[in-house]
Image (cartoon, grey):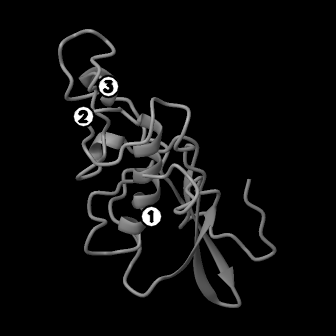
Amino acid sequence: MFLSKYPIDFDKTRTFQTFLWKDMPGAYLPTDPNDVDGNGDTSSYYTAEELEVFRLSSKSHWDIVVNVDGEEIHCLCHHPTPPVFDDGTAEEYPSSVVSDWNGLRNHDEIRFWADYIDPSKSDYVYDDNGQYGGLEDNAKFVILGDFNADPIDGDAT
């Protein structure tokens, strides 16, 4: 839920529910070092069929445009998956020890915004309406949400 005392420009607001994890260049897709599924392939924790429908966003990624006293502010909202509740934290990528599927997804969900705000890195990004690209150079934005990533005491990758 997003509440604002300032007007929201719904025509410029974007959502990214259908963006697939595999479509992110250099995605930290988890390997399967322990061959959990027993198929002999340790290169990917997910099957090709699963990756064809596996969203990057575990919950939400929204670019909500708010008009604050005539200024357009992009409120980049998200709530990435916690980097725990999997088989461990990868110390390197790709890991030959653990899959770290939640930790790697958390990393890429956060990286999504880093790419989105950089016009030189956002050409691959597409929204739920098929529009490509991220923010324009010098666009004003704030990133909001629960990142689930404490760089000192947490299990973030």
Rendering coords of residue 17 (x, y %):
49, 44
Q: Residue at x 31, y 66 (%)?
A: 122
The secondary element bearing badge 1 is classed as: helix
The secondary element bearing badge 2 is classed as: loop
| Mark 1 or 3, closer to the camera | 3
Amino acid found under the numbered disc labelled 2: Ser
Q: Nearer the viewer, residue 50 or 41?
A: 41
Find disc 3 in the rendering and name its residue: 46
2 or 1: tag closer to the N-terminus? 2
Q: Residue at x 29, y 41 (%)?
A: 22
Q: Are marks 1 and 3 in contact (CB under 8 Å)?
A: no
Q: Residue furthest top?
A: 38
1 or 3: tag closer to the N-terminus? 3
Q: Residues within 10 Å of mark 1 (few under 14, many from 20)?
A: many
Tag on residue 11?
A: none
| Mark 3 or 2, closer to the camera | 2
Tag on residue 113?
A: 1
Find disc 2 in the rendering and name its residue: 96
Q: Nearer the viewer, residue 122 or 127?
A: 122
Q: Is 38 situated left or right of 112 in this image?
A: left
Rendering coords of residue 127 (x, y %):
42, 53
Q: Residue at x 43, y 41 (%)?
A: 89
Amino acid found under the numbered disc labelled 1: Trp
Rendering coords of residue 154 (x, y %):
56, 53
